[in-house]
Image (cartoon, rainbow, N blue to C red):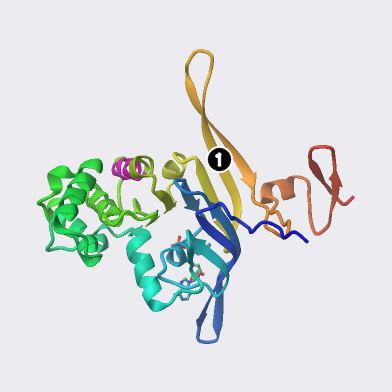
Amino acid sequence: MTRAPEFGRDALIVCDNLVRIYQTGSIEVQALQGLDLLIGAAEMVAVVGASGSGKSTLLSILAGIDAPTAGRARVGEWDLLNMSRGDRVRYRRQTVGFVRQQTASNLVPYLTAREVVDLPMAAARKPKRERRSRADELLKALGVADCADRRPAQMSGGQQQRVAIAVAMANQPSILLADEPTGELDTVTSAGVFEALRHVNSAFGVTVVVVTHDPEVSGHVERTVAIRDGRTSSEVLRRTETDADGDTRVIAEEYAVMDRAGRVQIPREYREALELTRRVRLALEADHVTIRPDL
Ligand SMILES: Nc1ncnc2c1ncn2[C@@H]1O[C@H](COP(=O)(O)OP(=O)(O)OP(=O)(O)O)[C@@H](O)[C@H]1O
């Protein structure tokens, strides 16, 4: 008997039926309730969803900060459910870069931009000369070369977040995670920081997963994944098309996400429009499936 190919075999990030339950006293909160998600190498994905839907929990698991309760989570060769303490330290140092929302918490008040970018490389025992050239390369790539000798208090919020991206990229991670990186910034500054994330994605080929509330931000990535009640519920894919006159426009298409058991969530407006309730009629057509009210 041939076995089915492993779910997400070719993906860099695989979340398979991921569950995270938090227990506080006698209260259980299911932050992730069987989340499936595949992300390929060098992709840039925005994760959106209402407050409490599980976005930060997902990011903490991918960052190796938090451990799932059940399911499977893999990043490259790393199995995030079965890592020793030492593996976890190596994983966090070598494979992941993390940018937080609070600009101040990404940096160190008494260190200059060049010194703070150097920190993770020094911790990884990289040679001094290599560290210096990598720090300068990153600060330049992120448009903050002029901040190299400045401390956080001498930089704007947007500059601080660009330096934070440089810190996260210092050890050439394969994934860069950002949790609401523009949450504290105004619209114009946010757009600049977001552009910086896109730049590291294309220039260094790092896979970027960014959690955001900002529709302006999610509107600029090719793939936006929506999380609802601890599961991926829908995705929007965007592509740029050029018409005969040479004008380009962005086409966005929304997809529902089907889990591995075949479950699909029908958006509330569709259910209400046709009064779809507990039971619906399903029919297989030549190239599609219809869902009708049970009249
Ligand atoms: N350490 C924890 N202990 C207990 N419950 C937690 C913990 N962390 C998160 N939760 C709960 O898990 C659920 C998901 O939280 P999470 O922070 O992942 O959501 P989120 O989508 O990131 O929300 P927000 O957009 O507000 O940051 C929420 O109900 C939250 O209260």
Q: At 50% across and 54% down in the image, what residue appears?
A: 12
Q: Is residue 258 visible?
A: yes
95 left or right of 259?
left
At 64% from the left and 51% from the top, the residue drawn is 257
Vertical arrangement, residue 140 with respect to residue 116, above or below: above
Residue type of the residue flagged with mark 1: Leu
In the picture, measured across the screen, residue 215 lies left or right of residue 126, that is: right
Kindly tell me whether mark 1's CB lies below 8 Å from ligand 1.
no
The outermost residue toward the left is 149
Residue 12 is covered by the magenta coloring? no
Which element type, helix, strand or loop, lies under badge 1?
A: strand
Q: Is residue 53 above or below residue 169?
A: below
Q: Residue 273 placed where, x, y %?
A: 74, 45
User: What residue is pinned by disc 1?
Assistant: 237
Magenta region: 189-197
Residue at the spot 13% in from the left edge and 49% down from the top edge: 148
Q: Which residue is at the front of the view, 171 or 220?
A: 171
Main secondary structure of the magenta stretch: helix
Q: Residue at x 31, y 43 (%)?
A: 196
Can you name the residue that lies furthest to the right here?
A: 295
Tell me the quarter of the image containing the N terminus. Answer: bottom right
Q: Quadrant of residue 38?
A: bottom right
Q: With 255 as the anchor, is 62 left or right in this view?
A: left
* 29 with respect to 200 (left or right): right
| Residue 249, above or below 6 | above
Which percent across, then down, holds residue 264?
70, 54
